[in-house]
């Protein structure tokens, strides 16, 4: 009788062990599948800001074009507007003669402040904060754009 009881205990302990292993495996697989879903839903860590220094003085036109932004300076105020179109991500250009920003791909048009005028784009262009740097005499030495 003792031998049969021992086999039953071994069988139960194996079942318990397999049940625990199965639960752990299901838990790990569930977490592995949930991670991309959570990333897709927007649980991301924002990247650290980047700083781009533009030396002063700007050209007489009052604007400076970089790869990622266009810097405008007028009446002592500075603003930086993204060069990425909100429609399909093309790189926009500032048309100095018309004083507008235009997308070469689909002709979305924006003001120099990044406000949408017309086109297939539905949103304004992104803007970046600009810090005006000056020396002790008050002369502007540069512009620090935070991306």
Image (spheres, grey):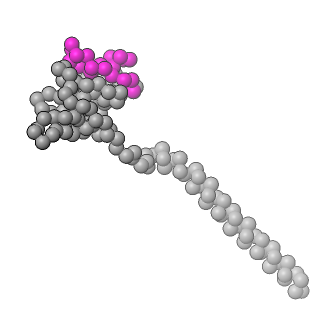
Q: The C terminus lies in which quarter of the figure?
A: top left
Vertically, is 84 above or below 51?
A: above
Residue at position x 34%, y 43% in the image: 49
The residue nearer to you, when weighing 78 against 5, is: 78
Which residue is situated farthest in the front direction here?
136
Tell me which corner region of the image, top left, top right, bottom left or bottom right, holds residue 114: top left
Give yes or no for residue 101 being in the magenta stretch. Answer: yes
Tell me which corner region of the image, top left, top right, bottom left or bottom right, holds residue 136: top left
Residue at position x 45%, y 46% in the image: 41
Left or right relative to 36: residue 113 = left
Q: Is residue 124 visible?
A: no
Q: The N terminus lies in which quarter of the figure?
A: bottom right
Left or right relative to 67: residue 127 = left
Magenta range is 89-107
Predominant SS along the magenta part: loop
The residue nearer to you, when weighing 110 against 136, is: 136
Give yes or no for residue 16 being in the magenta stretch. Answer: no
Residue at position x 13%, y 35% in the image: 139
Vertically, is 25 above or below 112?
A: below
Which residue is situated farthest in the top direction here?
97
Tell me which corner region of the image, top left, top right, bottom left or bottom right, holds residue 98: top left
Residue 66 spot, x, y in % from top left: 32, 27
Residue 126 spot, x, y in % from top left: 29, 33
Which residue is situated farthest in the bottom direction here?
2
The residue nearer to you, when weighing 5 against 54, is: 54
Vertically, is 19 above or below 114?
A: below
The residue nearer to you, when weighing 29 against 54, is: 54
Q: Is residue 77 visible?
A: yes
Residue at position x 88%, y 81% in the image: 4
Residue 137 spot, x, y in % from top left: 10, 39
């Amino acid at each position: 009788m003792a031998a049969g009881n021992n086999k039953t205990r071994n069988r139960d302990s194996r079942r318990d062990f397999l049940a625990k292993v199965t639960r752990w495996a299901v838990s790990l697989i569930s977490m592995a599948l949930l991670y991309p879903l959570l990333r897709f839903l927007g649980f991301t860590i924002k990247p650290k800001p980047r700083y781009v220094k533009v030396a002063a003085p700007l050209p007489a036109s009052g604007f400076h074009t970089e790869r990622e932004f266009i810097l405008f300076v007028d009446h002592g105020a500075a603003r930086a507007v993204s060069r990425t179109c909100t429609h399909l991500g093309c790189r926009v250009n500032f048309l100095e003669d018309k004083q507008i920003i235009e997308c070469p791909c689909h002709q979305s048009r924006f003001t120099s402040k990044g406000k949408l005028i017309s086109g297939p784009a539905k949103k304004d262009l992104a803007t970046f904060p600009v810090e005006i740097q000056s020396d002790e005499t008050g002369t502007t030495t540069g512009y620090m754009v935070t991306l």
